[in-house]
Image (tube, grey):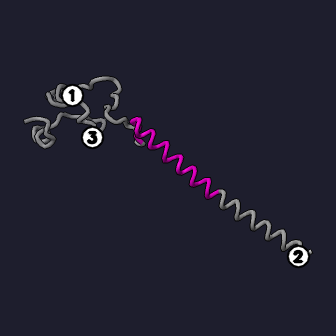
Amino acid sequence: MANEYGQLQKERDKLQAQIAEIDEKLRDMRSARQNELLAELKELGWSPTGARAGRKAAVAGGKRKSSSDAVCPICEVPGHDGRAHRSQGKNKKPFTKEELREKGLAA
């Protein structure tokens, strides 16, 4: 009985070693194939970051207005729009001349 158990254990260990060897070969094959496919995709212009080589990313909504074209509804000063007042919270008030100079919004 003990001898039979020992033989089965050796056979099991041998099979597990074969499985580990096969798994390693499969990993190597999979890695090699993956590298081949990546090289092929790169030749076609694919980038792993998702950006396409030689093309600009599409901008949703078309051309945006520059804030320098806007006149602020709060300050009534050209060169910025109301977004510059976001930091003021709910009680928005016009910037002083000094604040406009600090922010580079007026000369």
Tell me the quarter of the image containing the C terminus: top left
Tell me the quarter of the image containing the N terminus: bottom right
Q: Under tag 3, what secondary structure?
A: helix
Q: Under tag 2, what secondary structure?
A: helix
The prevailing secondary structure element of the residues shown in magenta is helix
> Residue at point 17% right, 25% down?
69
Q: Nearer the viewer, mark 1 or mark 2?
A: 2
Residue 59 placement: quadrant:
top left
Label located before the other in sequence (3 or 1):
1
Label located before the other in sequence (3 or 2):
2
Residue placed under numbered mark 1 in the picture: 66
Position of residue 15 in the picture relative to residue 55 (left or right): right
Q: Which mark is residue 36?
A: none
Instruction: Report the amino acid beneath label 2.
Output: Asn
Q: Nearer the viewer, mark 3 or mark 2?
A: 2
* Residue 58 magenta-highlighted: no
Residue placed under numbered mark 2 in the picture: 3
Vertical position of residue 86 compared to residue 9: above or below? above
Residue 44 placement: quadrant:
top left
How many residues crowd around disc 3 within 10 Å: few (fewer than 14), some, or many (20 or more)? few
Residue placed under numbered mark 3 in the picture: 87
C-alpha separation, residue under disc 1 versus residue under disc 2: 86 Å
Q: Are marks 1 and 2 in contact (CB under 8 Å)?
A: no
How many residues crowd around disc 2 within 10 Å: few (fewer than 14), some, or many (20 or more)? few
How many residues crowd around disc 1 within 10 Å: few (fewer than 14), some, or many (20 or more)? few
User: Could you say where residue 84 lies in the image, as x and y percent from the top left?
Assistant: 23, 35
> Residue at point 67% right, 61% down?
20
The magenta stretch is 23-47
